[in-house]
Structure formats: structure tokens, C-alpha cells
Amino acid sequence: MKRMPTQGLPATDVLTALESLRANDVDWRNGRAFSLAYHAGPEAIALAEEAYRRFSGENALSTDAFPSLKTMQADVVSMTRDWLGATADSAGFMTSGGTESILMIVKAARDQFRHSRNITKPNVVLPTSAHAAFEKACAYFDVEPRRSPVGTNWRAHADGMRELIDENTILLVASAPQYPQGVIDDVPSIANLALEHGINCHVDACMGGVTLAYLARLGEPIPPWNLAVDGVTSMSVDLHKFGYTSKGASVVMYANKMLRSFQGFVTDNWLGGFYASSGALGTKSGGSIASAWSVMHHLGDDGYLDLTRRARRATVALADHIDQHDDLALRVRPDATLLSFGARDSSSLNIFAVADQLRTRGWYVDRQQPPDSLHCTVNAIHHDKINLFVADLDEAVALTKSNQRQGSVGQYGNLE
Ligand SMILES: *Cc1c(COP(=O)(O)O)cnc(C)c1O
């Protein structure tokens, strides 16, 4: 078992040891990860890291002490407004990530409807494709999740959700795009259903919040998906994904300040005086805030447009290859920059064994089910990597088929 060294080590030795721990990590800086990490180029990474370093010790728990962080957070939230179709009434907060954004949405809806309708046993109606973070939120805040089936091509539609709604339903969820298959749900029908019942509708755009606006500008047929749709009451967008900033940055945006007011927490019921926080965290590093502020200013609208173009081209190239493959089945044509595929015939090809083969060749892809599938989140770094990847993918498929290997499902997150 590891023990603290009795005498401290020189910083250079510590850094050497730290680097050696990386030996088996996926090489995301060279585009080997189709999940978990995003890369807009060496300059953007260097800026993200430098800004993080400069503000890593600052604490956004008190913006009285650090007004710089108040300004930066307000700027960051404001710079997402056009992406999200926000109006003059919309109001948001920065959070530490998609999970915190979603936790806060569920908590805010719970408190709002306890207050306005005295709902004490609330439920949320959400498609089977909505992110696992909603299950976490429901478990944390004692809200019942009611999962509705997705419609054709994995897209959720109000029709699947309507019958699950009752007088205790507080929130409907749509995703743009949903994570597992990368398609955009029918947001207008779901938001309209929420309006009919006078309840909230959250659009989880943790993935698409940055890219969809640019994809539309690039001529892709993007259906309505944001706060411009009547009935949408909140959105989430992760800056540490396609915003290409350091980890620990997301924005949750509400249609108005009344809705947002249920997110915060205040107390004076302890010996430490008045305490207030906007989200789940107490101490909140200035690093991720400064990093997001800096990267967004550095990349700008034209930068994000170009990065989105590259990510989309790579996605389409990969989707085309899989679509034409004799042994692989693309689940559905991707709407944005995420896709999923499995074996055409799962009795002759174990798709998780293909993932094992890819891992030995240095590639990391997600494994998911049901149905047994691999998942790729394609970002700008992949624009010149797809040829390399599909060559290895083809080899991995051929090898797996010939030796009938079995693989294991693995997991998207874990407990250690
Ligand atoms: C990533 C993701 C989340 C969760 O966000 P984290 O940043 O991992 O906490 C939620 N919803 C969707 C659609 C996502 O892609």
C-alpha cells in the first residue's frame, strides 16, 4: 500500500514519476481516443493549460474575493447564448460538467414543483436514450425516472412519452443529440407536450450545444433543437467536450430567472454564517473557468465553425466506411459528430472483441449496450486520422472473425 514519503521528493523527480504513470494511457493528443477527450490543436491546448494553471488556485465559491471569476463566468455563459437560442430573459450558470448541469436541472424542477403544485412524489419522463446522469440525478434527489421507448432511428418523439405522464410529472427530457446513437430527438413535439401539461422540458445538448449551430451554418439539415423552440425551459452544453476547453466546464441555461432561481442553495443554519452556492460544488476552481473563457476567446466563431467542419467530415467518412463494411452495421446515419455501430451478424463477430483489438493498436472506443455496440465521439483531431483508424478497424474485424474471439462489455464510467 502506498505511503506518504517521509521526506518530500524534489519536484523534478515527482514530475518524472508522474509522466511515467501515463505509459498505458490512451494517446488522445494524437487522436487515438474516440471518447473522453477533445483536441482543437496544440495552440488551443497550450492556452487552455496555461489559463488553467494561472487560475487553478482561485476559488469561485466567493466572487467577492475573486471578481475576475464572476466576470469570466458571466462572459462564458453569455457567449453560449447564440448557440443555445437564448432570449433576453434567459439566464444560466457555469457548472463543473454535464453531470452537474443535469443534477441541477432535476433538483431545480423538483423544488419548483414542490413549491408551485405541492408535488411531493415527482417523476421525470425521459427516453431510454437520455444520458445516465439523469438516473444519477433521480437517485440523488429522490425523483422517479420513467423511461419511454425511442422511435424510429433511435429518435425520441412525444408519442412515446405521453402515456407515462401523470399529475406528478415535473420534467420531460430531449437530447440534441443523444449520446448512444448520435441522433437529435424530436425536440418540438416533446417541448410541446411539456407545454400542454405546464411542466418543464430540458434539452440535453451536452454534446451538440456547440456543434449544432455550426452544422446548420455548414448546410446540414438540423431540426429545431434549442431555446428558440416554444416550451423548452432549459439546456445544458458541455464546454469541456466540443468547446475544446479543460475539464470541469459546462453551462446550464434556463429560459428565465424564475426557473433558474430554484437551482441555488443558501443556508445560515450553522456556526459559519450565511452560505450560498449556485451548484453542487462548494470550492470551485478558477482553473476551468479561466480556461473556458480563454479558449472561447481564442477560437472564436470562425474557429468553432472550422473545428465543427473538420469533426463532421471525419464523422461522415467514418460512417460511410462502416456503412459499406460487410461485417459491420451502422446503427443510424449520425446527425452530428457521434456514431454507433455493431456486428451485422453477432454470432460470427463479437464487437467487444473488436474493441479489444483496437485497444492493443492504441485506439480507444466506447462499448455500449443494448444492443452490443461500439461508439465513437469524433472531434476535430480526427480529421486526418480516419484513414489510419479504419485500416486498423478492418484488421481488427478480420482477426476477430477468424479466431472467433469473445470480448467483454466494459463500462462507460467506473467506481475507482
Ligand atoms: C457527456 C454527456 C453528459 C454528462 O456530462 P459529463 O460532462 O460527463 O458529466 C450528459 N449528457 C450527454 C448527452 C453527454 O454527452
Image (tube, helix red, strand yellow):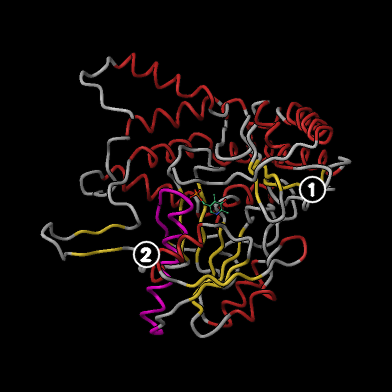
261 in relation to 414, above or below: below
Q: Nearest the camera: 410 or 394?
A: 410
Residue segment shown in magenta: 92-118
Q: Which residue is drawn at 65% across and 49% down?
A: 368
User: In the rendered view, does 243 fall on the left or right side of 360?
Assistant: left
Instruction: Tell me the mark number nearer the camera, choosing from 1 and 2.
Output: 1
Q: Nearer the viewer, residue 199 or 148?
A: 148
The answer to which quarter of the image holds residue 389 is: top right
Answer whether residue 107 is magenta in the image: yes
Which residue is rendered at x = 16% and y = 60% of the image?
274
Identify the residue position indicated by label 2 in the image.
263
Residue 350 location (% of width, % of height)? 76, 42
Q: Is the magenta stretch mostly helix, strand or loop?
A: helix
Query: Is 129 placed above or below 194 here?
Result: above
Q: Out of 394 and 48, give the one closest to the viewer.
A: 394
Res 20 → quadrant: top left
Mark 2: amino acid: Gln
The residue singled out by tag 1 in the image is 330
Q: Distance between the residues labelled 1 and 2?
A: 39 Å
